[in-house]
Structure formats: C-alpha cells, structure tokens
Amino acid sequence: MKTFDPTDFIPGVSLDCVIFGFDGSRLNVLLLRLRGFDEWALPGGFIKTDEHGDDAALRVLKERTGVSDLFLQQFKTFTHPDRTKVHVQELLRKGIIDENAREYFTSRFISLGYYALTNHNIVKPAPDYLSEECAWHPLDAVPELLYDHRAILEEALEEVRLDLQYHPVGQNLLPKKFTMPELQALYEAILDKELDRRNFSRRVMSYGIVEKLDEHRTGMAHKAPRLYKFKKSAYEKALKDGLSNRW
Amino acid sequence: MKTFDPTDFIPGVSLDCVIFGFDGSRLNVLLLRLRGFDEWALPGGFIKTDEHGDDAALRVLKERTGVSDLFLQQFKTFTHPDRTKVHVQELLRKGIIDENAREYFTSRFISLGYYALTNHNIVKPAPDYLSEECAWHPLDAVPELLYDHRAILEEALEEVRLDLQYHPVGQNLLPKKFTMPELQALYEAILDKELDRRNFSRRVMSYGIVEKLDEHRTGMAHKAPRLYKFKKSAYEKALKDGLSNRW
DNA sequence: CCAAAAGTGTTCGTGATACACCCATGG
DNA sequence: CCATGGGTGTATCACGAACACTTTTGG
C-alpha cells in the first residue's frame, strides 16, 4: 500500500461517513479502531485536490466496504474549531502518522458528514492504514468514539429518520426481492419504533414504489411470505420528488 | 476599513449566504455586485482560523445586513472542483483583489451554504470591500450570478420549502404582532402557491404556536384584521422537534 | 351602501389507526 | 394439529380540501 501523501489532498477538510448497515433486524454502524486506541472512529478520509466531495466519500465507502453503488447523502458540515483537538495530540504521540503527514494532521479540520445506507451482508469491512479493526456495531451498543464523531453519528441518524418521512428507503438495504415483513423490519429499525403490519403494507403499496411478485419466500417456518421488488423508475422518482408534501 | 489578510482565514473554504427577505408580498434575495462585474453574487466570506463556521456566517450576515439575530441554517456544502473556475480568472484580471490575497483567491474553494430568513425592512444592505452594490432582488427576477451561486440559491430555496413542512416560520420575518393574512402571505411567497385562507388559519392555530391578541390592525381599508403573536416557547419547541412526523 | 377583505362553520373525502379474522407452514 | 407468523378486510376518526355566508371597514 502506498503511503499517505498530504499534497494529494486539500488541507483542513476531511469527510466522515456514517455507514448504516441493516442486518435484518437491527441497524448497525461501521466503525474503525485506530492502532493503539481504545476508542473507535467513523470511516473518513480526505478530498483529493481535484476531486468532488461526493466522489471522495464514494471512494472512502468503496475502500471500507468494497461496495460502490451505495446510497450516499451529504447531510452537514462540522466546523467547530476544536472538534478534533481532544484526540489529535494523542494521535501524533502514538506515532501512527508518517513524519511527512504530521503537519497536515495537526491543523484544524472541518469535516463533511455523509451518511450511507447499506446491507450488512454485502459489505466486507476493511480497515484503513491507520486502523487495526473495522467492524459493525449495533446502534444501541456504540463504543466511545474519537473527536466529535458521536455527535456526527447522532445527527446522521436524525437525518435518516427525517429523510424517511419523505423518501423511500430500502434499495441497497434489502435483497432484490424482499418480503413485506422484511421491509417493515427495516423501517422499524431505523425509526426504533413498532409499526402496524397491515397499515404498513397498505401505505407502502399506496406509494406505488413496490411491485407484488408471484413468488414466496419458502424454507422458513410458518406461512411463506410473498416477495416484492422495488419499481425502479417509481422509486427513483420518489427519491427525487419526495413522497408527499403537507402544504 | 482594514485590508484583507488571507492568513486570518482558513484556506480553501468559503461560505455563501442565501439571505431571503420578505417584503410583505414577495421573497427577495440579497445580492452583491462586485466592482467591475455585471453579474451578481451571494454575500459570502471566509472562516477565521479559530472560528466556528456558523459564527462566520453570522458575522457575514451582520456585516451585510446590520442585523444579528437572524434565523440561520447551514444546508449544504458545495464541493465541485471547478465551481469557481469560470469567474476567478476574471476576478483577478480586474485587479480588485489585493496583491497579497491573489494566491489565496486562486486556489480551489469549497463553500458552506447557509440560508437565512429575514424581514426586508429591518435590513440595511451594505456592500463588502469587493462590491459596489448590495441590493434585494425578487426571486422571479434574479440576475446572472457568479460561480455556482445560481445553483446554491436554487438549493437553498428547496431547502426552505422543505423545512417549512416541519418547522414553523415567521419569527424575524414578520413584525412582533402580525395578522393572519400577513403570515399566510409569507407562506405563499415561500411556497409560490396560493393557500386557502380558512384552512390556513385553522392549521396554524392547531399547531399552538401563535396566540390570538385582543387587538386589530387598524388604519387600512376594509375590516381590521386581528393581531397575533408567536408563543415563544412553543415556537422554539416546534423549531427543535418539528411539527409532526408521518411514521 | 357597496366593494373588498376578514372571520367563522360545514361538508366531504382521503388517509391513518385500530382492530379481527382467515391462511399457510414446520415442527 | 397447533403455534406462529403472514395476508386481507372493515369501522372509525382526524385531518385536509373545498366551499358559503356573515362581518367590518373605508370610500
């Protein structure tokens, strides 16, 4: 692996990705543990000198997860002047930063927050060159995080819940063909709230974004649930235009 | 006025403010015309080396409008690598940038987008040191803008409309005491859409954020409309928690 | 007294909520 | 054959949309 060259990147600007993974019942978030640290951190990176921020985020995502077509959304930029201060000295002291990059890392950073939604299973977590572990953590058991990453995570979660009010969710998070209970479990995991089975399916169907298939998921106990798939064009239209406005 | 010293600011990061002003019937946006340019630009600025982005935006706002307690919202960061390329050469050629700042201005910039909502009347538009004019423009007659400012403006407007779905609007935009038709005119201006008088007032009242007063606005023709004021605590709670969730 | 705008009430339809019942499957 | 979960139907209620009538004011 080639070493980190600070001149490849614009200074003072980083990005952090809150990657949510759905495992069928719970939401998890992908975290890294830096060498020599007990705390964990959000996967992040820097923007190349001629790169769009969104492309940088996609690159980071691809590097950490192996997956390239995730739903990715910029949600906020974090600019507190001391946001990295608490841990950056420790980072330098531990000697995991190359000599030539120490100055780059010492400066104040603002960070673009992105969130991504993905399926737990298609992801192969890969640590970056600063980390020794990359792993999923369920949202109700998130360990201590570096810097202001805890706050970034919280805001990402709020943002996902807000987006859910107006935009369809599920593409990339569920298998191509999925059952209604699976989709419902996803919504319940994101909202951390139980929903009524019957009303849920009626509402989803009324949006016209899923299509009923003539197949059932067999093999498990109980009645075989019917399979559905997203209607691509309607789904994308709903992503762009929203699902309904109140005024 | 002291000259611009690039070492006071973090490099490569700017901010742009989309300041919407309501004049009683239409939404306007505050724009600057740079010396020697025909195009206009959003009021913007840079972040001091030890300053929070939000504080920098408040500072810019204060400098351009004279007003300090505006509702200000960060909504997106613009990171296209060539976003300023089209005009930055022209800017340098016109010689309105100090010699010592030319290098600072030449570099690629990412820009934090903020929007603010204010009352047209309480604002005293003041050009910055690069501009010769600072003036309101109605949304349906926005002139050519520099850089990607047109796109920033469009996205800000979309964001305001989205925020309107869930959050109260009106504080700072209307006088302390206002009439229901005035509030409705504001909503109509933002949404660019006519609303039903009767349904509107019922809905607003149901949110519990305004209080009916025993006063009327007299002096104009026709029936004297009743005055209302915002209930501060309920208004702020609604700003924070939103007005209603759909799931 | 009349035009124009403000205030209030009613109806209607849609969509959310809260239920109860039937169906399929594996053990 | 039964426990468990999946699928569908229906009554009710709240809310938004559409609409009509009355009230107040200045001219």
Image: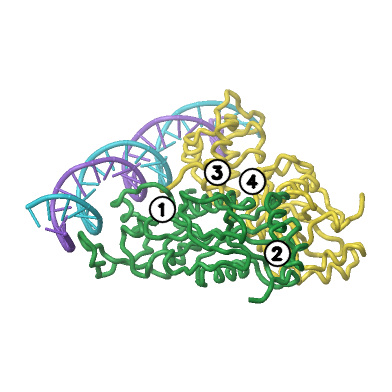
Chain colours: A yellow, B green, C cyan, D purple
| Residue A167 disc label | 3
Residue that label 4 marks? A25
The chain letter under disc 2 is B
Element class at badge 1: helix
Between B107 and A238, the one lying in front of the other is B107
- Tag nearer the camera, 2 or 3: 2
- Marks 2 and 3 sit apart, C-alpha to C-alpha, by 45 Å
Identity of the residue drawn at 77% across and 53% down: A47
- Marks 2 and 4 sit apart, C-alpha to C-alpha, by 58 Å
- Marks 1 and 4 sit apart, C-alpha to C-alpha, by 44 Å
The chain letter under disc 4 is A
- Marks 1 and 2 sit apart, C-alpha to C-alpha, by 37 Å
Amino acid type, residue under disc 1 in the picture: Ala
Horizontal side, residue A114 vs residue A213: left or right: right
Are the residues under badges 3 and 1 in a single subunit?
Answer: no
| Residue B189 disc label | 1
Identity of the residue drawn at 28% across and 69% down: B213
